[in-house]
Amino acid sequence: MTYRVFAAGLFAAALVLLGWGVPAGADEKKDGVHHGHVVKVADGKLTMVGADKKEVTHPVAKDAKVTIDGKEAKLEDLKEHTHVAVTMKEEGGKHTVTKIEADTKKK
């Protein structure tokens, strides 16, 4: 009996550690990282399409870190349809992009 309780507890702990039952994308919303594709870049703003197929435009901080395939870049260097991971922060009810990681090899 003790062995069964211990085994069940161990199994439950393993499921929690592995994230079983956590919906896909839950970490994205928690840490402010969103994945999508570039639609356009203009006037210090990034317009992108996310996994939900909705187009959204976000202001980009002047000091935002932009990388393309791991190399430092400028916001204007981002090309249409490029896959991006965008980190955002919220201040005063407004979301601002603080980091953009572009991956030209990912579709």
Image (cartoon, rainbow, N blue to C red):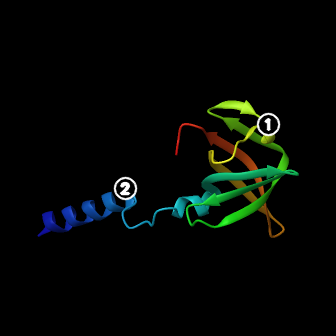
Of residues 30 and 13, the one nearer the viewer is: 30
Label 2 sits on a secondary structure element that is: helix
Of residues 74 and 94, the one nearer the viewer is: 74
Q: Specify whether 63 is left or right of 1.
A: right
Of residues 48 and 6, the one nearer the viewer is: 48
Residue highlighted by disc 1: 74
Residue 101 versus residue 44 in the image, above or below: above
Q: Nearer the viewer, mark 1 or mark 2?
A: 1
Q: Amino acid at mark 2?
A: Leu
Q: List x then y, in percent, for residue 39.
A: 70, 54
Q: Residue at x 67, y 35 (%)?
A: 68
Quarter-of-image position of residue 47: bottom right
Q: Specify whether 8 is left or right of 93.
A: left
| Label 2 Cα neighbours within 10 Å, binned few <14 / some 14-19 / many ≥20 | few
Counting the numbered discs, the total is 2
Of residues 16 and 63, the one nearer the viewer is: 63
Q: List x then y, in percent, for residue 73.
A: 75, 33
Q: List x then y, in percent, for residue 82.
A: 63, 45
Residue 13 versus residue 93 in the image, above or below: above
Q: Residue at x 53, y 42 (%)?
A: 106
Label 1 sits on a secondary structure element that is: loop
**Separation of marks 1 and 2 at Cα, in angstroms:** 37 Å
Residue 43 versus residue 78 in the image, above or below: below
Quarter-of-image position of residue 51: bottom right
Q: Specify whether 69 is left or right of 26.
A: right
Residue highlighted by disc 2: 18
- Quadrant (top left/top right/bottom left/bottom right) for the N terminus: bottom left
Q: Amino acid at mark 1?
A: Lys
Q: List x then y, in percent, for residue 61.
A: 84, 50
Q: Specify whether 96 is left or right of 105.
A: right
Quarter-of-image position of residue 49: bottom right
Which of pointers 1 and 2 lies earlier in the amino acid sequence? 2
